[in-house]
Image (tube, helix red, strand yellow):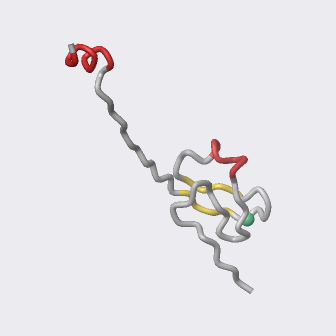
Amino acid sequence: MTEEFDTVLTDVPICPYCGLNHREWYFEMTEDGSYECARCGETFVVEVCHDIKFTTAKSESKAVASEA
Ligand SMILES: [Zn+2]
């Protein structure tokens, strides 16, 4: 019996063997590498995908000055 779990680009690492959500171990899995599942003990590979976004805004002082 083989279950398939959604393990692609998930918010937290999901064990591909048993589907365990590794939310509690999230901060130990911030580097690519092999990790051992906390529940089933199987070793699985984690690829960390960094999603970087930027937000910009006009400087408050300049916005006020332009209205004067
Ligand atoms: Zn597991």
Q: Is residue 17 left or right of residue 48?
A: right
| Closest to the observer, 51 or 17 | 51
- 20 shown above or below 61: below
Looking at the image, residue 59 lies above or below residue 36: above
Q: Quadrant of the N terminus?
A: bottom right
Please tell me whether residue 36 is drawn above or below residue 2 in the rendered image: above
Q: How many marks?
A: 0
Tell me where residue 57 appears, x and y as whole percent. 32, 30
Q: Quadrant of the C terminus?
A: top left
User: From the viewer's perspective, is residue 27 above or below residue 13?
Assistant: above
Residue for point 28% across, 16% down: 64
| Image position, residue 22 (x, y; %) | 69, 54
Q: Could you say where residue 5 lies in the image, as x and y percent from the top left?
A: 64, 73
User: Most extreme residue toward the bottom, as rendered?
Assistant: 1
Residue plotted at (64% across, 47% down): 26
Give me the residue at 78% from left, 65% from top.
40
In the image shown, does 27 or 56 lie closer to the viewer? 56
Between 19 and 62, the one nearer to me in the picture: 62
Q: Is residue 3 left or right of residue 45?
A: right
* Residue lying farthest to the front in this orientation: 68
The percent coordinates of residue 21 (x first, y second) are: 70, 59
